Image (cartoon, rainbow, N blue to C red):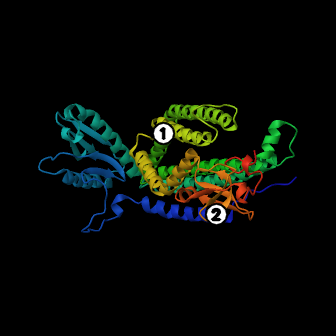
Amino acid sequence: MRTRCFLLPRNAIRGFALAGWLGLVAGFALAQPLDVFTPRPTGVQHDTRPANALYLHNRHIATFRASLLGDSPADRVELARVALAEALRNAERPTVTHTATPDSVRFELNGRTVFFLVAADTGTPRPEAALEPTSRDVQVRLEKAVAEAAELRDRLRIATDLLVCLGASLLASTLVSGTLQLRERVAQRIHAALHRPASATAGARLVAIFSEHAHVACRLVTNAAAWVIVLLILDTWVTFVLLQFAWTRPWGEQSSTWMREVLHHFASATAAAVPGLVVAGLIFAIARMVSRANAAFLHRVQSGDVQLAWLDAHTALPNRRVCDTVLWLFAVAMAYPYLPGAETEAFRALSVMTGLMLSLGASSAVGQALSGLSLMYSRSLRVGQHVKIGETEGTVVALGMFTTRLHTPAGDDVSLPNKLIFGLPIRHLTPSSGQGMTDPQAARRDDMGRPL
């Protein structure tokens, strides 16, 4: 009986060893009591927090918006910080209490006043009514911050949290490595299944025909799924590690909340976009049906099966192209409001920029297309005619929207831009002039040069 050992890659071991050492150092550094670090006075403050917001160990406690007894909100924050630091330095088991008055609430730590909260600090239209619920929220946050401050002094708790983080790191590395190995196994099985000998069924033959495309698509799907799982594992690991230490716990709470908000927003946006995508899909499906019906009808006109007084076989092809262009432009205009994000400024700016780029870059192409339509509708050129355009002589084998292809007596195919032909004299040669058709099949070719 053989025993398989699960080995991690060397790079992964080095990475997680480095992460473990960094976690140990950061944990001991962040776990020091607040009074150990004495901030140096500097002339420039780089704190991005609002000056009127009170924080304790990265946790937001309250926001002061009004002056009290001549102290500005920023002064009240500084006084509250000093009072909290003094109260926490001498308290082994701190207890938070508050005393309410008609227009303010006093918060105490082990009977020592740390700060006041007044009605104007609530920032609501009815501050007196909002003072009580706001004070309850402030007390909950203050109790949590005070408990975390006591936790920062517990060396045994810090060591236990570090061991838990190392175990979580090993588990995360195992899950990441297992996910990547599972991706390889799934890819190998898909590759083997797609390269099996095809059976006689129609589905197997279809899979055999598109096996390479199916292999690439499956590979992309498996890679995307694997990396999404890896990102979720890493996000969970980072959040778990941040939640273990009192100093970084607020960041971990924000990380988990951010991930939930992102997933909720993504799911809501996807669900909201489904009806619009269905309507846009129906519009494009109807446009495709009308385009195919129009192409079938004009193909019968071009082949001579249907004869109309206002439409002949030579103008059926340009009519089909013009109708298809107008039809698809109309379909895009109708489906535009139903596309996800069509009402946003970014989508509109992108549409305007794309249209501007197309208008600047497609001016020559539009001129070529208009010249081709003019040649078709004026019947100046037809497939099978032997002509001389400028210095080029040959039989017209294809008349397109942008170029016209001639087959020369030397056996060469020459493509001339329609815009160039539109400005040159066209001489129609006949067999009586000693120059006949060089390609007997040219008169029986379509506009793409394919024999009919």
Q: Label 1 near label 2: C-beta < 8 Å?
A: no
Residue 151, relative to residue 289: is it above or below?
A: below
Q: Residue at x 45, y 36 (%)?
A: 337
Q: Name the residue under label 2.
A: 392
At label 1, the amino acid type is: Pro
Q: Which residue is drawn at 88% across and 38% down?
A: 200
Which one is earlier in the sequence, the residue at label 2 or at label 1? Answer: 1
Residue 94 spot, x, y in % from top left: 34, 46
Disc 1 on helix, strand or loop? loop
Q: Mark 1 points at which residue?
A: 340
The tag on residue 112 is none
Tell which of 423 and 416 is nearer to you.
423
In the rendered image, which quarter contains the C terminus? top right
260 relative position to 74: left or right: right
Tell which of 150 and 18 is nearer to you.
18
127 relative position to 226: left or right: left
Q: Which residue is drawn at 57% across and 39% down?
A: 319
Specify the quadrant of the image occupied by residue 406. bottom right
Q: Residue at x 32, y 38 (%)?
A: 137
